[in-house]
C-alpha cells in the first residue's frame, strides 16, 4: 500500500483543470443509490462565492455516519447523487486570499456564526449549520468548496509528526470526544469511565487521561481494551455477559485500587448501544455526570429519579464547535495525543472496498481515503456542480 501512497504523493500536483471562465475540473466519488457502488464523476466547478474557499483534499476519513447514509438508509439532507465525507483535511487553493496556500482541517459541522445558538456559544448545534457530505458535496473528492469562516489552520509543527491526510481524523473522530470531555467539566483527579473504546471512544479515553483523570475503559472487545491499556488508560475490563450490578461492584473495586474518588464519577457512553446506555445509567452514583455521546435508535428504560436521588447530571453532546478545533490540534501538536496508530490510509479509488469492509467491521483503525484521481482512467461526465 505504501507504494501506492508514494505514487499519489509524487503526483500530488494533480492538475486542477482550468477551463473557460475560470471553470475548474474536479473529481468526486458520488453516492447515487442506497447500498450501491460509489461512482466516479468528473464535474466542472464554476466560480466561488464570497466567503467560500476551494480546498484540494489531502484526506477524508470514513465515519459511521457515512455508512448510515450509504447502507442503512439514513437520509442525507442534500438529494442524491451526493459526495459523502465530512472528516476532511486539505490545502486552500482558491477563494479568500488570506487562506490561499494554508493547510486546514474542515470542521465536520460548519455553523452560521450569526444565530442565537452560535452567539450563545453553542455553534455546534447551529440550526443553519452545514455539514459536508450531507448538506452539500463532501470530501470523497479531489476538491471541496466550503465557507472559509471556520477553517482550522494546521500549524507546521504538527506536520513534522503527522501527514496532512492523517490529520483528517481531527475533524470528527477526535474533536467530538474533545468537546465531550470539556462539557463534562472533567478536572484532574476525576474518575472517568469510558464505555466503548472504538474509533471515537479510544480518543475520549486518551483525552480524559490528558486532562488528568484516572481512566477506566469498558468494552466487550478484548482487542479494543488492550489498545486502550497500551495507550495509558489506567484500568480496563470486559463487561460481556456481566449484569449491571456486577459491573458496578467491579468498578467500585477498581476505583478503590486506583485511589480514584468514590463519588462524582464522570461516565462517558460512547458505544452507542442499548446495552452500553443501560450500563452507563446504572453506573451513576452520587454527584456523577453521565455524558451521552454514542447514538442508537434503541430506547432504554431507566428510573430518571435516580438523577434526583444521586444529585447527578445527564448531558448530551453533539459534534464539536469550530472554536475548539485549535485546542484539539494543539493536543496533537504537542505530542500529548497520538493518532498514527489509530489511522490507516487508502487510495480513494478503493472507496467501494473500504466502505464494504467498514460495514463488515473488518478494520480496527479509522480509514482515511487519499485522493488518487490522476491514476483512475474511466470517468462519467456531468456539468455544473452546485454546492
Ligand atoms: Zn462523523
Ligand atoms: Zn448559527
Image: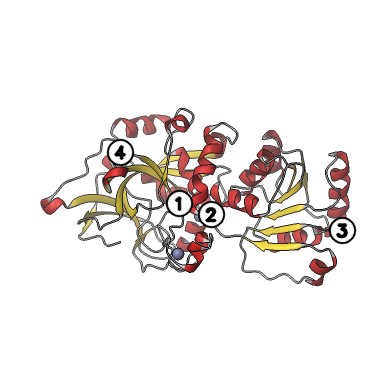
Position of 27 compared to 106: left or right? Answer: left
Q: CA distance from mark 1 to mark 4?
A: 18 Å
Q: Which residue is mark 3?
A: 245
Query: Dot 3: few (<14), some (14–19), or many (≥20) neighbours within 10 Å?
Result: few
**Which picture quadrant has residue 254?**
top right
Position of 10 compared to 300: left or right? Answer: left
Q: Are marks 2 and 4 in contact (CB under 8 Å)?
A: no
Q: Which residue is mark 2?
A: 320
Q: Position of residue 212 (x, y in %)?
A: 71, 39
Q: CA distance from mark 4 to mark 3?
A: 56 Å
Question: In the rendering, which numbered label is found on residue 101?
Answer: 4
Which sits in the foreground, 297 or 172?
A: 172
> Upstream in the sequence, badge 3 or badge 2?
3
Ligand 2, seen in the image, is in the quarter at bottom left
Query: Dot 2: few (<14), some (14–19), or many (≥20) neighbours within 10 Å?
Result: many
> Upstream in the sequence, badge 1 or badge 3?
1
Position of 251 compared to 328: left or right? Answer: right
> Upstream in the sequence, badge 1 or badge 4?
4
> Upstream in the sequence, badge 2 or badge 4?
4
Count of all numbered marks drawn on residues in the image: 4
Question: In the rendering, which numbered label is found on residue 107?
Answer: 1
Mark nearest the camera among 4 and 3 is 4
Q: CA distance from mark 3 to mark 2?
A: 33 Å
Q: Is residue 271 visible?
A: yes
Q: Position of residue 358 (x, y in %)?
A: 52, 50
Per the image, label 3 sits on a secondary structure element best described as: helix
Q: Cβ of disc 3 within 8 Å of ligand 1?
A: no
Query: Dot 1: few (<14), some (14–19), or many (≥20) neighbours within 10 Å?
Result: many
Q: Are marks 1 and 4 in contact (CB under 8 Å)?
A: no
Per the image, label 1 sits on a secondary structure element best described as: loop
Amino acid at each position: 500500500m505504501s507504494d501506492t501512497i508514494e505514487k499519489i504523493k509524487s503526483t500530488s500536483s494533480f492538475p486542477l483543470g482550468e477551463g473557460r471562465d475560470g471553470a475548474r475540473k474536479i473529481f468526486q466519488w458520488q453516492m447515487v443509490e442506497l447500498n450501491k457502488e460509489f461512482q466516479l464523476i468528473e464535474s466542472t466547478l464554476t466560480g466561488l462565492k464570497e466567503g467560500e474557499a476551494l480546498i484540494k483534499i489531502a484526506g477524508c476519513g470514513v465515519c459511521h455516519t457515512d455508512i448510515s447514509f450509504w447502507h442503512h438508509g439514513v437520509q442525507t439532507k442534500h438529494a442524491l447523487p451526493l459526495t459523502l465525507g465530512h472528516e476532511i483535511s486539505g490545502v486552500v487553493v482558491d477563494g479568500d486570499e488570506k487562506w490561499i496556500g494554508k493547510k486546514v482541517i474542515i470542521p465536520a459541522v460548519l455553523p452560521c456564526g450569526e444565530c442565537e445558538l452560535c452567539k450563545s456559544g453553542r455553534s455546534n448545534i447551529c440550526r443553519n449549520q452545514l455539514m459536508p457530505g450531507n448538506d452539500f458535496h463532501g470530501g470523497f473528492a479531489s476538491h471541496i468548496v466550503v465557507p472559509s469562516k471556520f477553517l482550522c489552520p494546521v500549524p507546521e509543527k504538527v506536520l513534522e509528526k503527522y501527514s496532512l491526510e492523517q490529520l483528517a481524523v481531527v475533524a470528527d473522530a477526535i474533536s467530538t470526544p474533545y468537546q465531550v470531555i470539556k462539557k463534562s467539566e472533567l478536572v484532574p483527579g476525576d474518575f472517568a469511565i469510558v464505555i466503548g473504546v472504538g474509533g471515537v471512544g479510544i480518543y475520549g479515553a486518551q483525552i480524559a487521561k490528558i486532562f488528568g483523570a484516572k481512566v477506566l475503559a469498558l468494552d466487550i472487545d478484548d482487542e479494543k481494551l488492550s489498545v486502550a491499556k497500551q495507550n495509558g488508560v489506567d484500568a480496563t475490563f470486559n463487561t460481556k455477559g456481566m449484569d449491571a450490578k456486577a459491573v458496578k461492584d467491579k468498578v467500585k473495586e477498581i476505583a478503590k485500587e486506583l485511589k480514584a474518588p468514590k463519588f462524582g464519577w464522570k461516565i462517558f457512553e460512547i458505544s452507542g448501544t442499548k446495552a452500553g446506555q443501560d450500563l452507563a445509567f446504572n453506573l451513576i452514583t452520587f454527584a456523577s455526570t453521565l455524558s451521552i455521546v454514542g447514538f442508537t435508535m434503541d430506547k432504554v428504560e431507566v428510573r430518571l429519579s435516580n438523577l434526583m436521588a444521586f444529585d447527578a447530571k445527564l448531558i448530551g453532546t453533539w459534534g464539536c464547535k469550530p472554536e475548539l478545533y485549535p485546542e484539539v490540534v494543539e493536543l496533537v501538536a504537542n505530542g500529548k495525543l497520538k493518532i498514527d496508530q489509530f489511522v490507516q490510509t487508502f487510495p480513494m479509488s478503493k472507496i467501494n472496498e473500504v466502505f464494504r469492509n467498514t460495514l463488515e467491521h473488518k478494520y480496527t483503525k479509522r480509514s482515511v481515503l487519499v485522493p488518487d484521481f490522476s491514476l483512475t482512467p474511466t470517468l462519467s461526465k456531468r456539468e455544473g456542480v452546485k454546492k
